[in-house]
Image (cartoon, coloured by chain):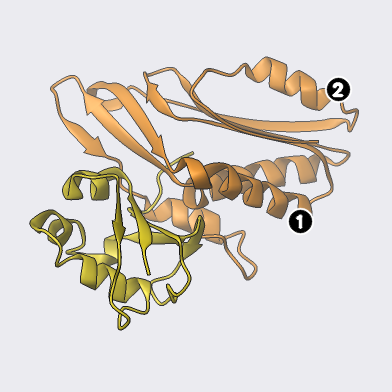
Amino acid sequence: MRRVCVQAGAFDPGAELARLEALGGGAVASFTGLVRGDGGLVEMRLDHYPAMTTRAMEAIAGEAEGRWPLIGLTVIHRYGPLVPGDRIVFVGTASSHRAAALESCAFLIDWLKTSAPFWKRERFADGREIWVEAKVEDDAAASRWRTGGHPG
Amino acid sequence: MAIQMLYFAWVREAIGADAETVAPPAEVETIADLVAWLAGRSPGHAAAFAEPDRLRAAIDQDFAGFDAMIAGAREIALFPPVTGG
């Protein structure tokens, strides 16, 4: 099962986990990313490249499926305005092996951060608005999985 | 050859448009050439493209390096490094 969603609306991690558990693999891993309220952040807006986003996420999903024996994979990424505490992204993997579930989950979120066309804009209580800068450590996290080709 | 350009995040804001159609001359062969050529279109373009190292590109919805050839491209996007996840 492969489930890739780009959506403005909220998602329910419990329902997503149940869907993966129902596949019967015996091992399910997940990551949920949420908006932090650090530094007086009042809103985060995620822009994306609609014609490319799903395609890029499907490519990342396909890469994970090629590297680990997965029986299920779910990737959900939201766009639009979000506030602290909102969920941004969900990655879930199901396998018969815990290492495959855990490693592919880490791989998927690392590559989503560097290879899916999303951009975060932050607005703070004092009125400041900034585009979030890409982090060197995110590139480093993604590159530890690199064995040759990279979609970015 | 008409190319649909798309701009995202601060690139879009600097240029003041999220899209435009351009027809670069034949000597514009790569993404790097295109960025240099586009920079001459307006002060906003010049500001957006002042530091090419801060830009990333996609040709027809696939990431592309600055040395990528643009011949045959229908849609080219220019944007900052992505920050999703």
Q: Position of residue A36 (x, y in %)?
A: 38, 25
Q: Which residue is mark 1?
A: A67
Crowd rating for badge 2 (residues with CA inside 10 Å; few <14, some 14–19, many 20+): few
Which chain is painted in orange? A
Specify the amino acid type for callout 1: Arg
Which element is circle 2 on? loop
Q: Position of residue A35 (x, y in %)?
A: 41, 25
Q: Residue at x 17, y 64 (%)?
A: B50
Q: Which residue is mark 2?
A: A22
Q: Earlier in the sequence, mark 2 or mark 1?
A: 2
Q: Which residue, as the protein is rendered here, is positioned at the far left? A: B43
Which chain is home to disc 1?
A: A
Which chain is home to disc 2?
A: A
Q: Residue at x 31, y 60 (%)?
A: B55
Specify the amino acid type for callout 2: Ala
Q: Quadrant of the N terminus of chain B?
A: bottom left
Q: Which sits in the foreground, B69 or A86?
A: B69
Per the rendering, the colour in which chain B appears is yellow
